[in-house]
Image (spheres, grey):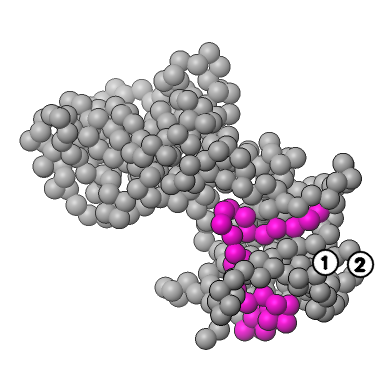
């Protein structure tokens, strides 16, 4: 059976072919536009794959030191030499195949021609072996310093469905005490079912005079991870989730009661628009705007404080932090992020242009609600005579 994968997985092979063809990787600004004068010449790409038959990881090196040539090595031995033009042709073909593919429910794509070329260059799987967030490893020439470091990059593609930045799990649940309700309210509200049950439950909670009070994160590992960025980051995230899940419904209930003053300029219109579409104010930028205006932590300079901290969080998640694993504050993808644009450009946000990267993440991500049954959130429950509810955090590219 041939190789199959989604557009994001095939995009990783496209990145490999495109970079071997071009021999350099360009940086991007905060709007994902190529910076023509900022790039790294690529000396070689290092690719690890797990051999299922031999049950071990094998490493091939694709050397670009000779102009116009790709030399492939295994264990220090040269296997073959190919023209970079061959990689350019195959990259163009694969880009067109990914871009034009119309996938069914399985969302699986096969590209027999590319698979044949992959075998010719000793690639047998779509995704290289990795224990962390590194999708591709390369040695580059740093023009500024003269060094030739080896960097790992994470890859995201805009050719397929928007990728997740932070995947939901049991570790990403946040706990809230719900005050102002009676225990008998709990059963009735939990009886609300359907595809948008969380939204309708929150609407009913607000209608009955209930209020949400941040209590804590469900798992200490993720809580400790985000506290490395800022000790108050769990609270900021908790407030952000409340705005995402409940703001539109809260506004709708308040409108029923009349006389509600919206906290952010134009949010009334935005909330009405989002309410029609998804019942959420979802973009990270808009959610942080509301938090900034409310300034629950009473910062003296809220316009910078909340945004700065949240951008650092997004960057940490992108480059190393995982909710279920203890994080030491270091980037695993130590080179940065590679993004495949709609036009097929392969652009990098490197540690040297981290400000652009953080701004890009901030402008292009949104909150999302995953399956509530799978991740066990959205039900009211009683503990020690108090009522609680969990909400789940997932962040996706817009």
- Give the SS element for disc 2: loop
Classify residue 154 as left or right of residue 104.
right
Residue 178 drawn above or below residue 284 = above
Question: What residue is shown at x 28% (from left), y 40% (from top)?
Answer: 390
Question: What residue is shown at x 25% (from left), y 38% (from top)?
Answer: 389
Q: CA distance from mark 1 to mark 2?
A: 8 Å
**Res 155 quadrant in image:** bottom right
For the residue carrying disc 2, how many other residues have a C-alpha within 10 Å: few (<14), some (14-19), or many (20+)?
few
Residue at which label 1 appears: 63
User: Quick one: 82 or 36, which is closer to the camera?
Assistant: 82
User: Quick one: 354 or 266, which is closer to the camera?
Assistant: 354
Expressed as whole percent of the image width and height from the top left, the position of residue 332 reads 61, 47
**Res 223 quadrant in image:** top left
Question: What residue is shown at x 22% (from left), y 54% (from top)?
Answer: 194
For the residue carrying disc 1, how many other residues have a C-alpha within 10 Å: few (<14), some (14-19), or many (20+)?
many
User: Quick one: 66 or 167, which is closer to the camera?
Assistant: 66
347 falls in the magenta region? no
Question: What residue is shown at x 48% (from left), y 36% (from top)?
Answer: 225
What residue span does the magenta drawing correspond to? 112-140
- Give the SS element for disc 1: strand
Classify residue 115 as left or right of residue 273.
right
Expressed as whole percent of the image width and height from the top left, the position of residue 24 reads 82, 58
Classify residue 338 as left or right of residue 252.
right
**Is the C-beta separation of discs 1 and 2 under 8 Å?**
yes
Expressed as whole percent of the image width and height from the top left, the position of residue 245 reads 34, 40
Expressed as whole percent of the image width and height from the top left, the position of residue 265 reads 47, 26
Residue 207 drawn above or below residue 111 = above
Classify residue 29 as left or right of residue 108.
right
Name the disc covering residue 66, or none. Answer: 2
Tally of numbered discs: 2
The reply to whether residue 275 is in sight is: no
Identity of the residue furthest to the bottom in this view:
1
């Amino acid at each position: 059976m041939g190789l199959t994968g989604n557009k994001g997985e095939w995009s990783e092979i496209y990145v490999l072919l495109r970079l071997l063809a071009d021999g350099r990787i360009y940086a991007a600004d905060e709007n994902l536009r190529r910076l023509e004068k900022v790039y790294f010449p690529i000396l070689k790409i290092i690719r690890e794959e797990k051999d299922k038959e031999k049950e071990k990881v094998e490493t091939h090196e694709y050397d670009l030191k000779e102009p116009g040539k790709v030399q492939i090595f295994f264990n220090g031995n040269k296997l073959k030499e190919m023209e970079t033009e061959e990689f350019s042709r195959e990259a163009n073909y694969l880009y067109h195949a990914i871009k034009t593919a119309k996938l069914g429910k399985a969302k699986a794509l096969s590209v027999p021609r590319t698979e044949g070329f992959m075998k010719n260059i000793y690639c047998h799987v779509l995704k290289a072996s990795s224990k962390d967030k590194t999708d591709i490893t390369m040695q580059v020439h740093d023009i500024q310093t003269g060094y030739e470091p080896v960097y790992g990059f994470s890859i995201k593609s805009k050719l397929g469905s928007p990728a997740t930045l932070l995947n939901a799990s049991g570790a990403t649940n946040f706990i809230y005490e719900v005050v102002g309700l009676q225990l008998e309210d709990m059963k009735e509200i939990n009886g609300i079912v359907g595809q948008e049950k969380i939204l309708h439950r929150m609407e009913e909670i607000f209608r009955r005079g209930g209020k949400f009070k941040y209590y804590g994160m469900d798992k200490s590992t993720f809580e400790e991870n985000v506290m490395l960025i800022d000790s108050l980051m769990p609270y900021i995230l908790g407030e952000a989730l409340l705005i995402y899940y409940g703001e539109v419904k809260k506004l709708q209930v308040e409108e029923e009661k009349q006389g509600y003053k919206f906290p952010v300029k134009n949010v009334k219109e935005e909330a009405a628009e989002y309410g029609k579409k998804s019942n959420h104010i979802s973009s990270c930028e808009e959610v942080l705007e509301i938090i900034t205006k409310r300034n629950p932590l009473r910062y003296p300079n809220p316009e910078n404080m909340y945004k700065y901290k949240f951008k650092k969080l997004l960057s940490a998640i992108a480059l190393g932090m995982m909710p279920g694993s203890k994080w030491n504050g270091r980037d695993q993808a130590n080179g940065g992020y590679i993004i495949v644009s709609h036009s097929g450009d392969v652009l990098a946000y490197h540690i040297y242009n981290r400000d652009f990267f953080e701004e890009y993440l901030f402008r292009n991500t949104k909150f999302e609600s995953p399956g509530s049954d799978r991740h066990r959130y959205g039900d009211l429950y009683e503990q020690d005579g108090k009522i609680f509810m969990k909400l789940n955090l997932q962040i996706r590219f817009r």
